[in-house]
Image (cartoon, rainbow, N blue to C red):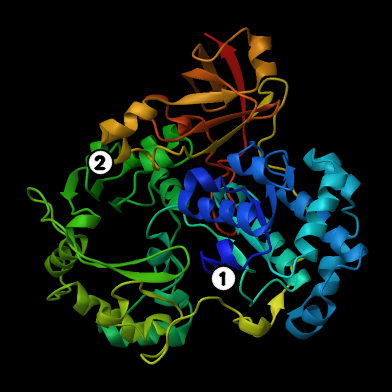
Amino acid sequence: MTNSIDELEHDAKAIFIIGSNTTENHPIIGFKIKKNVLYNGAKLVVADPRRIELAEYADVYMQQKPGTDVALVNGMLNVIINEGLADGDFIADHTENYEAMAEVVAKYTPELAAEITGVPAEDIRKAARIYADSEASSIVYAMGLTQHSTGTDNVMSVCNLALLTGNLGRPGTGVNPLRGQNNVQGACDMGGLPVVYTAYQQVQNDEARAKFEKAWDVSLPPKNGLPLTEVINRAYVGDIKGLYVVGENPMMSDPDLHHVKQALEKLEFLVVQDIFLNETAELADVVLPSACFAEKDGTFSNTERRVQRVHKAVDPPGEARTDWEIICDLSTRMGYPMSYRNAEEIFEEIRTVTPSYAGMTYWRLEGCGLQWPCVAEDQEGTCYLHKDGQCTRGKGVFNAIEYKPAVELPDEEYPLILTTGRDYYHYHTGTMTRRSAAINEFKPEGDVEINPGLAAELGVESGNLVRLTSRRGSLEVKANVTERVPEGVVFMTFHFVETAVNWLTNADSLDPVAKIPEYKVCAVKVEKV
């Protein structure tokens, strides 16, 4: 997030939510947005293929077809430029490549965008005006925007929107992705990506690599690693022989589980380190039991870049150990001695190689924590990035983005679009939440949301069993007849192993840059059982 969570409650005068079911997936943030709308009069624009709760509070709700986000945002950009709502001074002083972007979006009139997206042209105009006219407009998005074969294009498009209107570098503005798990931001900050070390220092940058080689007294490879989706594909063809999985459950969360299972079974050696025996661990040669969040000390970095202290509450059960102790022991046995007295000593090392964390200490993180970048101990951290339009590389870059259709579109045999997401009650692959009897009282099983028109055509009611089939497989699941989904679209969560929707999704349609799968668009058919 460029900005802070509380700004969505107090500073934002208009909020554009796209691809985020905020009240279900980030309920505290969703609550703050509702308070701003209800009590402060903030304007709200919502774009989502499902009619989520926040659509009921929106000044404009745009129900775009799954996979058409670029066309929708380009339509808004077109309106802002043609109606003179762009921030010319901001563009001149703080951006580059405006002309190329403007040339591309010139053809995306609201009428053309409406034809592609299914959103009425007048709603696109209203949404653009609300966003551009506000003195402080914030963009909020989540995986509904990114989990597409055009996910990178989608994100660059909303960045264009912020740059065009000067909604960057001030309270209540910015481009704000909501992280889907409690320490995703921290994992990325610590180099949990195949192309960077900590603080996004590039693996292929000789100077950065030399710094880490000196700190760790090792020689490091100059090549980037692989994202998980490519790891699975390489394992499938035999290029990867061993895999060490920590805190991940690809046998539920990855696309085309047939392909995933075959790839994992071809490995010579699979290790899983986790707090429960999940579906992936059942295939492992070795399982290493690790401590959960309440059983260890350390830090979490949340979605607004806030680094917070985590204090151990109870001891780990049985043979479970903290992740860092397991990794250090394994490293030592493999020939690279690694030992620390405690988690704080690890954090002190982190500070020395991570510029954005350099000013943080354990005592400073007590209480509310600090938001990075915090580069010196006399600094208080950073509430919002790019102050006064000063972007990291000097100027913000517009990108000329053409709309590209999803890879797998409906046809005569598979006439519907399946899109996936999360449920209010459960979390990710259900590894933790499905072990809670109280939560299961509210949501004990999965279902598929279908439009009343399709239900009538099939002759089914809520609770009836239907068969959902894609090019990769079939599953039987109970129908949930609801107007939340439009005609031609069905929706499922991926929390339930009994109806694991990723048996159906597509592993071949990856974003070319981020390599993220197209979970949000999958061609299917539905039949009554």
Q: Earlier in the sequence, mark 2 or mark 1?
A: 1
Tell me the SS state at disc 2: helix
Q: Is residue 315 visible?
A: yes
Residue 130 shown left or right of residue 152 in the figure: right
Residue 118 locus on image (x, y percent): 80, 38
- From the viewer's side, name the closer residue of 172 and 80: 172
Q: Which residue appears farthest toward the left when viewing the image? A: 318
Residue 449 locus on image (x, y percent): 56, 25
Residue plotted at (85% across, 52% down): 125
Mark 2 or 1: the one toward you: 1
Q: Residues within 10 Å of mark 2 (few under 14, many from 20)?
A: many
Residue 246 shown left or right of residue 113 in the figure: left
Q: Which mark is residue 2?
A: 1
Residue plotted at (57% across, 27% down): 471
Q: In this picture, is 276 found above or below 225?
A: above
Q: In this picture, is 122 found above or below 157?
A: above
Disc 2 marks which residue? Answer: 281
Under mark 1, the amino acid is Thr
Residue 229 locus on image (x, y percent): 47, 49
Residue 494 locus on image (x, y percent): 45, 35
Q: Which mark is residue 300?
A: none
Residue 28 shown left or right of residue 64 in the figure: left
Please tell me how many numbered marks the rendered image carries.
2
Distance, label 2 to label 1, CA atoms, is 36 Å
Residue 446 shown left or right of residue 126 in the figure: left
Locate residue 141: give its quadrant.
Answer: bottom right
Locate residue 35: give its quadrant.
Answer: bottom right
Tell me the SS state at disc 1: loop
- From the viewer's side, name the closer residue of 372 and 30: 30
The quarter of the picture where the N terminus appears is: bottom right
Under mark 2, the amino acid is Ala
Q: Is residue 390 visible?
A: no
